[in-house]
Amino acid sequence: MNLAVLFVVAACLAAALTPFMRHLAHATGMVDVPGTRKVHRVAVARTGGMAVVLASGLAVALFVCLDPPGAGGAGAWSGPMVPLIAAAALVFAVGAADDMASLPAWLKLAVETGATALVIGAGITINHVTLFGTTYALGVLSPLVTWLWVLAVTNAFNLMDGLDGLATGLAIIAAATCATVLMARDHTPEAVLLIALAGALSGFLPFNIFPASVFLGDAGSLVIGFILAVTAMTGWQKGTTVLAGAVPLLIFALPLADLAIVAGRRLGATSPDGATRGVLAALRRMVQPDQRHVHHRLLALGYTQWQVVLVLHGFALLCSALALLTFSRS
């Protein structure tokens, strides 16, 4: 099985599993009901991410079983891939639980931190940062920077899941771009995982475009962001663990920029209880949902959902093209 076949298999599996998961959502009440801060007007299933993750996992399992050399060899999956998959399973579990019954933000953050600790414990860390040709050693700050990076990318993709097809398309673009770099750097297992993920997302996308009949949910968006964040760390290694800043920052430019703007605005705002200082007040402001993300602002300017999604996908494609150009010259 070559990589193109892997992509198609993952897409077909997701296309077959999504209607089943959509039916399950309506049967069990796992639906996203309309609200004042939401743009959809009918209840929509939020189990799409479960179909994507399951399809990706099945496709990877088939690929590894049928073509171990093409997957980097069976031994390659006993290294960093084991803690990555175990940690992603933790994130998936808390995301699925949140889709079934809304969980407090602190609990999700705690599980994400635990998953990141698994990755750090396995030696997948950012020890250096290379920006504009200069490499900076992080030293004792390495675990903290790694934690911040993983949580930022993970939750950035979650926050972008606000319009039909938006986060799915952004994830396909990011996964395909990262997979290209990973293959060039001979990180085959990580590339296989991302190609399967991109394929599954592509099979899911027809159900998720406007008007969507199923959403990714936290089980999908959180896992996607987590996998992309960790594979970026493993994929930009150069002897010691190095995150070459320009390339991954360009690939994730839109979600990270939106996260930074949202975080800055919420931290500078006043809490409903009037508090402006203190850690708890800051955390409360950080998790308060609103309609002031970049996609909401474009909608407010009069653009349609289709137009907003196409514009933002186009911007992501441009950033990814620049990232590949930057990588090819490095």
Image (cartoon, rainbow, N blue to C red):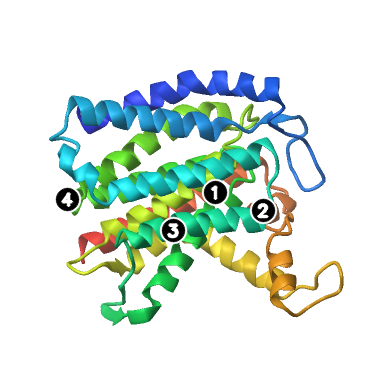
Crowd class of label 2 (few under 14; some 14 to 19; many from 20; radius 10 Å): some
Q: Nearer the viewer, mark 4 or mark 2?
A: 4
Q: Image check: 319 left or right of 276? A: left
Residue 206 appearing in the image? yes
| Label whose residue precedes the other's in the sequence (3 or 1) | 3
Tell me the amino acid under the disc marked 1.
Answer: Val
The secondary structure type at the circle numbered 2 is helix
- State the residue at coordinates (30%, 68%): 244
Check the picture and name the quadrant holding the N terminus.
top left
Mark 3 or mark 1, which is nearer to you? 3
**Residue, disc 4:** 186
The residue pinned by badge 2 equals 298
Q: Is residue 254 visible?
A: no
Residue at the spot of label 1:
311
Q: Disc 4 residue type?
A: Asp
Gap between marks 2 and 1, in whole Å? Answer: 10 Å
Assign a secondary structure to mark 4.
loop
| Residue 84 picture location, percent across and down | 36, 49
Foreground disc of the pair 3, 4: 3
From the image, which quarter does the C terminus lie in?
A: bottom left
Mark 3–mark 2 Cα distance, whole angstroms, equals 33 Å
Give, as a three-letter code, the residue at label 2: Leu
Query: Splitting the image into 4 quarters, where does residue 173 fall?
Result: top left
In the displayed structure, does residue 12 sit left or right of residue 79? Answer: right
- Classify residue 3 as left or right of residue 288: left
Q: Is 27 placed above or below 150 here?
A: above
Q: Nearer the viewer, mark 3 or mark 2?
A: 3
